[in-house]
Image (cartoon, rainbow, N blue to C red):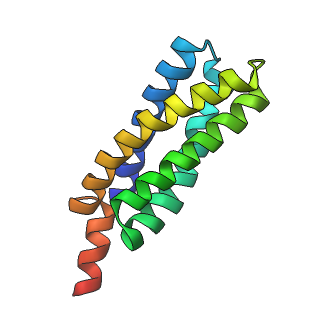
Amino acid sequence: MEHVKAMLIKVVMTLAVLWIVLGAFYGMDFWPMILGTTVVLGILSYFAGDMGILPAAGNMMATISDLVLTFLVVWLMGLWLTDLSGGEVAVAAIISAVVIAVGEYLFHIYLLKSGPVARHRTDRKV
């Protein structure tokens, strides 16, 4: 149940940021761009970053990996799913990545203190 709660928090945060940045500022469609990118990012970053990198390397490394992953996913999906120029998509991806990275840093604190990562660490010590 902890993983479901954590994934919901992550999806809501990512969806809100992408909807504002990509939808409001860049006029990208909710489907498939915003919702599709949220799903892809959520799955990749949760399992690779939050469950893999965060426990092994800490918050800062996991946040940096989320920043890079978010930029790449938003940029590549934006090139694939929109008619915007590569430069416009890159700027939208940078803005999205920075804002999401700030949110991810705070999300990682939750995961480390009371989320699934904290629970997993506690289970290992017993």
**Where residue 113 appears, x then y in whole percent?**
21, 60
User: Is residue 54 among the parts visible in the rendering?
Assistant: yes
The quarter in which the C terminus is drawn is: bottom left
The quarter in which the N terminus is drawn is: bottom left
Relative horizontal placement of residue 40, taking residue 126 as reference (left or right): right
**Where residue 54 appears, x then y in whole percent?**
39, 64
The residue lying toward the viewer, choosing from 18 and 35, is 18
**Where residue 3 appears, x then y in whole percent?**
39, 57
The residue lying toward the viewer, choosing from 45 and 36, is 45
Relative horizontal placement of residue 104, taking residue 71 as reference (left or right): left
Q: Dividing the picture into quarters, in which one does residue 111 lie? A: bottom left
Relative horizontal placement of residue 81, taking residue 52 as reference (left or right): right
Relative horizontal placement of residue 104, taking residue 75 as reference (left or right): left
The residue lying furthest to the bottom in this view is: 126
The residue lying furthest to the front in this view is: 87
Q: In the displayed structure, would residue 95 be above or below residue 70? A: above
Q: In the displayed structure, would residue 121 be above or below residue 50? A: below
Which residue is painted at 50% across and 31% down in the image? Answer: 96
Q: In the displayed structure, would residue 30 be above or below residue 52? A: above
Which residue is painted at 67% across and 26% down in the image? Answer: 89
The residue lying toward the viewer, choosing from 3 and 74, is 74
Which residue is painted at 40% across and 52% down in the image? Answer: 4
User: Is residue 1 among the parts visible in the rendering?
Assistant: no
Which residue is painted at 57% across and 53% down in the image? Answer: 44
**Where residue 8 appears, x then y in whole percent?**
40, 43
